[in-house]
Image (cartoon, rainbow, N blue to C red):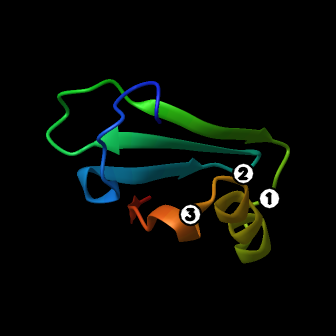
Amino acid sequence: MEELQPEHTSGQWRLFIDSSAVSWKAALLQNGNKLHFVPQANAVYVKEMNENLQVLLQKIFYVEHWWNIMC
């Protein structure tokens, strides 16, 4: 994030999570859509389960930023 916009705040971004039967994708979207999305994670052959979502959120350090989540 620092390379894209050093003065960013977490409230300016939302986390978009897309899941299917065999994959997960996560990206940050800027409120207002003025900036390009920032891919955060991509996992294949991962089932849609709460435990897997928890691992995904840990890997992208969600608790440090508290972005709004969209699914």
Q: Nearer the viewer, residue 62 or 71?
A: 62
Give percent across and percent down for residue 8: 31, 43
Question: Farthest front residue?
Answer: 6
Crowdedness near tag 2: few (<14), some (14–19) or many (≥20) residues, C-alpha within 10 Å: few
Q: Is residue 11 left or right of residue 23?
A: left
Q: Secondary structure at mark 2?
A: loop
Which one is closest to the eye, mark 3 or mark 2?
3
Give percent across and percent down for residue 63: 56, 71
- Residue drawn at x 39%, y 30% is 37
- Residue drawn at x 53%, y 66% is 64
Could you say which quadrant of the image residue 36 lies in?
Answer: top left
The three-letter amino acid code for the residue at tag 2 is Ala
Question: Farthest bottom residue?
Answer: 50
Instruction: Locate the C terminus and report the quarter of the image it occupies.
Output: bottom left
The three-letter amino acid code for the residue at tag 1 is Lys
Which one is closest to the eye, mark 1 or mark 2?
1
Give percent across and percent down for residue 43: 76, 41
Marks 2 and 1: in contact by CB < 8 Å? Answer: yes
Give percent across and percent down for residue 59: 73, 55
The three-letter amino acid code for the residue at tag 3 is Tyr
Q: Secondary structure at mark 1?
A: loop
Lower sequence index among marks 1 and 2? 2
Residue that label 1 marks: 47
Q: Nearer the viewer, residue 18 or 62?
A: 62
Residue that label 2 marks: 21
